[in-house]
Image (cartoon, coloured by chain):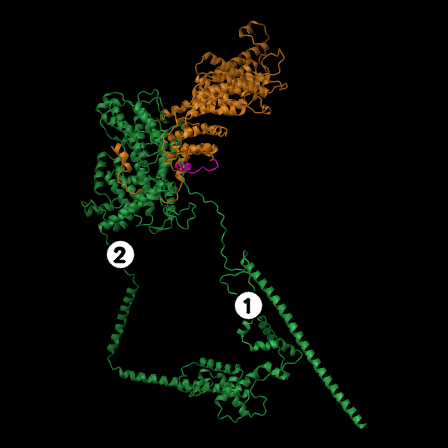
Chain colours: A orange, B green
Amino acid sequence: MATSTSSNVNMDELEGTAKKSSKNGINSKLDLVINNRKHANYVFDILEYLQADKDKDVVSAVNASKKLFCVLLKRGDLFVGKLPSEEDILSADHNAEQKYRMFMRHRYNICKDLLLELIHHESFKVKESALVTLMKFVSVEGRFPLLAKDWEEHYHFPRELLKAVAGQLLSENEDMALLISRFQEFLEMADVRYYIMRSISDSVVRVMGKAKGVILPVYQGNVFLLTSSICMPTQEAELSNFLVKQAAKQGDWKAAKLKEHKRAFEQMWICFLKYKLPSSMYKKVLVILHDSILPHMSKPTLMIDFLTAAYDVGGAISLLALNGLFVLIHQHNLDYPDFYKKLYSLLEPSVFHVKYRARFFHLTNIFLSSSHLPIYLVAAFAKRLSRLALTAPPATLLMILPFICNLIRRHPACRVLIHRLSASDEPCDDPYLMEVDDPAHCHALESSLWELQTLQKHYHPDVAKAAIAINKPLTEQEDDISKLLELSAYEMFERSLKEKENQAVPLELEVATQLLQGSGAVLRAHFSLE
Amino acid sequence: MKFTERSNTFLLPHEIHNLQMGKPQKKSLADKVRRTKTSTEIKNNPFEVKINRKKFEVLGQKTKHDVGLPGVSRSKAIQKRKDTLLKEYKQKDKSNKFIDRRFGEYDTKMAPEDKILKRFALERQRTHDRKDMYNLNEEEELTHYGQSLAEIEKFNDAVDSDSDSEEKGLLSAELTASHFGGGGGLLRKKTAGEKGNEGDQKQKSRQELIDELIMKSKQQKRERQNQKEESQVLTEKLDQDWKSIQVLLSKKPPKSENKEDEQKPKLEEYDMMVRELGFEMKAQPSEKMKTPEEVAREEKERLQKMEADRLRRMQGDLEESGGEKQVHWSADDLNDGFILDKEDKRTLSYQDGKWNIEEEVEKEEEEEVEEGGDDDEEEGESGQEEGSQSDAESEEENEGSDEEEGHSDLDSEEESEGEEELPPKPSSSLSEEERLAEQEVAKAELPYTFTAPENYSDLKSLIHGHSPEKQLLIVERIQKCNHPSLAVGNKVKLQKLFGFLLEYIGELATRSPPGLDTINKLIPQLCGLCQLFPAAACKAMQTVLSDSAHEMEEAIEVKGRTSFPGLDMLIYLKITALLFPTSDFRHPVVTPALMYISQALTKCPVTTLEEVTSGLVLCCLVLEYVTLSQRFVPELINFLLGLLHLAVPVKQSLGYPVVPPFRPVGKSCNLLVMRNAEGAESWSKKTLPLAGVQGLSLPSEVERDHYRLSSLATCLDLVKRCASLYKSLPSFDHVFQPIRILLAKHLPVESFPAHIKDLHREILELISGAPTLHPPLVFEKKKPIPLKLFTPKIVEVLDYGKKRGSSKQERERERLKHKYKKEFKGALREIRKDTKFLAREKLSEIMSRDSERKRKVKELFGSLATQEGEWKALKRRKK
């Protein structure tokens, strides 16, 4: 045992020295390359380390190359203009200075390629440092452009490099969530954001065009992550943070204009949403649509097609599309035929169990708050909701019961649902037709809300109390359901625990002697202790 | 009689003046008439009477002033003025006059003896009562200093025992009487007492009299002191004499005296006894022995009362508004819904000799202790050592108690051994044989007293290694040894014991295989403890529930779903139903428990047969919870529908909605679909094992099919129970419609055994009858609000003619103001009348004076005329 540990220690020491030596070596070589052109060939060693096995070596190499090429760029030691191939350099007659610059430029290009490859490295640390280095190159290259100024251009931005970075980020095989979140800090800069949006649109068109209607979940996930992490400015003045400070006036630069930003943003989203999405992606998009996409579009009406399609999908996606549709109807005069009919058909038992329940009922509440709705429609909604309430969990019931009461309050003509005076003695069957999807033909107005009467026998005391409200004429004041929308079963549970803590606890009358004893003895009838 | 008349007239002062005036006052004619006429005559004379007209007749009112007699009142007023004002006026510029009313004081003609006699007679007359008028032979009672002489003579010597001060007081009283009586009494006495011998003597002066009196009193005092001293000396002498004689008289032997001495303490003892007995509490009349019938009847009444109480709680405050229940309304009820609920009110009471307020404090303590519950074993051991000490203390009590039931075979030696020995703690390192052997020993030597465990590991070490029966016995003994009435801290200990038992049960349930048998045995103990400490039990159950619900909630937040609660939670839920009334409208434990089950039934997806079992157990529990109260649980129906859906082989064109956690299609959607038809034939109805929740070992497909069928049968039975339970709900049809469609159209009944077929048929019969008809909803009828009526408001008026509507002070002020005004006016009037009267008097005076002068002038003229005439006549005659 003792021997083995000592050998381990030795091994560690050895490794430690090796590591140190490699790091020291890289740094010393870096110094040599920077300080003396004679040692320019050490750059190969540095680039070699970029492909090393150990993460630490790679990271230090990445850092070294960052330092090296930044210095070279600033010095102007890289060839500017159209770069001849390496063979041409040898054949053509260039002076030593030019040759050196061309040589270094080639090394720089190779370094960039290697770094772009490193973005797919297993280690996040490597990935991260590669990304940061590339973005550093972007910023330095922007200041010291590598393109010859053969034509009048004032605005330099290394678009190609950024596009390549974007292309690497939007991987088709790998989930880049972590790196994208790291990338978010660069997206705060207006120029990076603008060019990234442009590159995303290009990338989506290219990749999805190739896929031909096939869903690429990973790729689309990456695209969604990147696009959704773009935080759009709302005012022109906010466009002040740039990665590359332009020497000339910024007024004409596209990246400095909000309008251009909006256009790019819009184009990016439309390109992305044009193709078929996985359903989870659909939901994600719809969740943020009304909040962070529609306000930043120059023409939100372009989303109508997407939203109507989503609304027709059914289920949770329809529920979510409702929100975007609401924005369009409310703010952009969208006229949607049979909107209420569709909304009516959305009411299914599952509505009470989905995650977006609160959002859906919030919107439904808004849609049904109009006093110009026909009575039959409101009655149909009230009746359908109460029928569905027969399967709802108590947390939802606490919300839906005041909801129905509010509907009746808003439309006093609906009071017949809970108070029908004519022929009050004759019992009748429920004339309401649940299966009919058209609220106009479901005979809701001829029915009564017996379901609420049923719920008066609900096991939860609060629900029973809420249901008993229909026994008396409703109060004028509407109930505030905004607090009840988010009510969860766990909150109710907690509340029921807290209630009446300091009161005497009633006990069961008969003292039990066996486990399976009890009222009804249902458990004993079906289960045995063995 | 003559004298009196005269003296009376004499004593009227104004008549003196009148007499002095010389000429009597002239009186008006009217006055004369009035005086002569009687009052009735005046009243009947219409000319005298002035009638005050009344505006309205008021019933029952008595008026004083309906008839006025102006003449009478005027003459009265004039008379009064004459008596008073006129006199003042007459005496206006005159000096005062002293009027001596003594009889014959200024009468020089009268002899002084006569005068005194007369005066004495007058005085006698004044004191003489009317009733004595005809008392002829009444002797005059002679007095001396106001006391009758006869009496003084009678009690001459009786004064000696009186103290000086009293005498002084008596004397001084007499003195003062004589001093402040104005001397009249003194004089009188003198006249009375010394009439005979002092008749000739001149009257003594006042100073002399007083001196005499003082002299006399001093003398008397001295005499009395002397007397007293003498009598004291005499009595002392007599006492001494008596003593000397007494010794001679009592010739009895001294023994008798001793005897008396002995008797005395005896008597005291006896007295003490008597007194003690007197003060001792009287024996309270105890309740008479009840006959079995009485006991039974009382028990029945108690049960009825409790059942009524349960119903009340079940209905909660919901149906109090319901009309069917006749609620007693107090006359003082404000009808504001405020009801003093006796059950819910926490009253200050004594519990085991302590205020029940302390419970909360103890609870806190308990929590504190529980925090420190995870102590190492050393503490536990030391606790046990302490316990062994306390064992000795509690031995006596246990000897008397009859807890050795069923252990009569243990002889006393073993018992004593057991008391000395601590409960064995078999360590896991011991070999199997050793352990067994030790167990044998332990079984034989089960101690009779246990200390209450301080923490859970204590309990475990106490219980570990015993058979369920022994464990039960141990717990029972712990409970008995630490009964709250035995020591102060026991209550807390037992409350903790409840928590430990719960924990132990949870641990038993999580074992595999679960120790359900032991749990079953422990139930009565748990119930007993719960009956003792409902609040602590409630708290413990709530903690268990909230911990588990919290876990569940975390899982739901992360994944959106959760797994079914373990067997321990199921057992806890079952125990909740055993301990607490499930039918209450709202209960601090049962309501959360139901919420918990509901959450489990909606959030836990069913993917395995074990989960089916868990779900079925939960369904059974829910059904048990609501059997009594018949409350509606939508989750139960949803879940049962989902389970049945798992048994439907063909999932196309479903006519019913499937509610989460179940999905219409997907993996594990055919969980309960039969794989082979053979399984159906060999299946027979069996109860499912509770342990199936933890894991099932069903190697073959046939066994699995059997299990599926059992689950399905259970499920169908539950549906049947639900259907009969909810038959009365208004929406019964709609609630069961999905199940009806599923059973009728989709379930492959043909392939199932006969038992399930029967069940299926019964359910369909139950739920597919003709749709029940309901009257449309109407609001509850309520009493119509009475119309506003415009009847006048009636205010009782008790004092007519007085101003109302103001406060008492204001009214008093008004009254005084009015009175002042009236008085002021009256005074003005009086003054005016007075001046008028005076003016009239003055005028008449002047007139009389004038007429006098005229008369005198006339006289003078006349005399002069006569003189003149005479002179002229003389002259003529002379001529």
Can you see residue A66? no
Quadrant of residue B72 within the rendered picture: bottom right
Q: Which mark is residue B67?
A: 1
Q: Which mark is residue B791?
A: none
| Amino acid type, residue under disc 1 in the picture | Val
Residue designated by label 2: B286
- How far across and how far down the image is residue B793, in percent? 50, 51
Label 1 Cα neighbours within 10 Å, binned few <14 / some 14-19 / many ≥20: few
Mark sitting earlier along the chain (1/2): 1
Q: Quadrant of the C terminus of chain B?
A: bottom right
Q: Is residue B344 left or right of residue B181?
A: left
- How far across and how far down the image is residue B237, in percent? 35, 85
Which stretch is magenta? A464-478
- How far across and how far down the image is residue A385, in percent? 41, 29
When the figure is inspected, residue B131 is found, relative to residue A338, above or below; the finding is: below
In the rendered structure, the residue with mark 1 lies on which chain? B
Which element carries disc 1, helix, strand or loop? strand
Magenta-span inclusion, residue A468: yes
In the rendered structure, the residue with mark 2 lies on which chain? B
Residue extending furthest toward the bottom: B878
Can you see residue A501? yes
When the figure is inspected, residue A450 is found, relative to residue A94, above or below; the finding is: below
